[in-house]
Image (cartoon, helix red, strand yellow):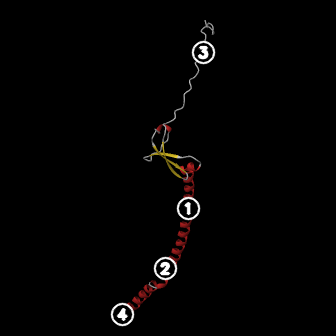
Amino acid sequence: AFFAIVRERRMRYSRTAVRLSPAPLARRQKLQADTLAALSRRQDRVISVRLERLRGKLTQADRLLATLSHKAVLARGFALVKDADGAVIKQAAEVVPGLALSLEFADGTADAIATSGAARPKTVAKPAAKAKEPGSQGSLF
């Protein structure tokens, strides 16, 4: 009976020892390492593509900013007029004699003093319409 118990325990040990072998662990570790390497390569490609797309969007936004910037308007010969506080003057009616102005051009700024106020357009009187003769239409009855 003792030898039967020893034999049975030896068989159980052999079965357990096979499962505890480092070979399956090594195979699994190699498989996981290969998977990790593949994911790393894929991540590098995805990041590269994403950065390229973002770089393109940034370039496009930069072009749009340059197009819509007031600097592009200044480059065409216009000027930006500001008062002493830096507020933009949008209409001639806002200018009064003696007002300190800052004129911004494409190549720099210049200070100025307003010598006159807003120029108001001259109104031209319409010629008076001639009165129609009351009897020229005739009778409707």
**Label 2, on which residue?**
29
Q: Nearer the viewer, mark 3 or mark 1?
A: 3
Position above or below: 61 against 95: below
Query: In which quarter of the view is residue 17 placed?
Result: bottom left
Q: Residues within 10 Å of mark 4 (few under 14, many from 20)?
A: few
**Label 4, on which residue?**
2
Nearer-the-camera pick, 100 or 7: 100
Q: x and y percent of residue 3 in the render?
A: 38, 93
Nearer-the-camera pick, 7 or 132: 132
Type of residue at label 2?
Answer: Gln
User: Split into 4 quadrants, where in the image is the C terminus?
Assistant: top right
Q: Are marks 2 and 3 in contact (CB under 8 Å)?
A: no
Q: Nearer the viewer, mark 2 or mark 1?
A: 1
Q: x and y percent of residue 23 in the render?
A: 49, 84
Q: In the rendering, which numbered label is found on residue 55?
A: 1
Q: Nearer the viewer, mark 4 or mark 3?
A: 3
* Mark 2 / mark 3, whichever is N-terminal: 2
Badge 4 marks a residue whose secondary structure is helix
* Mark 3 / mark 1, whichever is N-terminal: 1
Query: In which quarter of the view is residue 55 placed?
Result: bottom right
**Label 3, on which residue?**
130
Instruction: Give the Cα separation between the discs numbered 2 and 3.
Output: 107 Å
Type of residue at label 4?
Answer: Phe
Residue placed at 53% from the left, 75% from the top? 37
Type of residue at label 1?
Answer: Arg
* Mark 2 / mark 4, whichever is N-terminal: 4
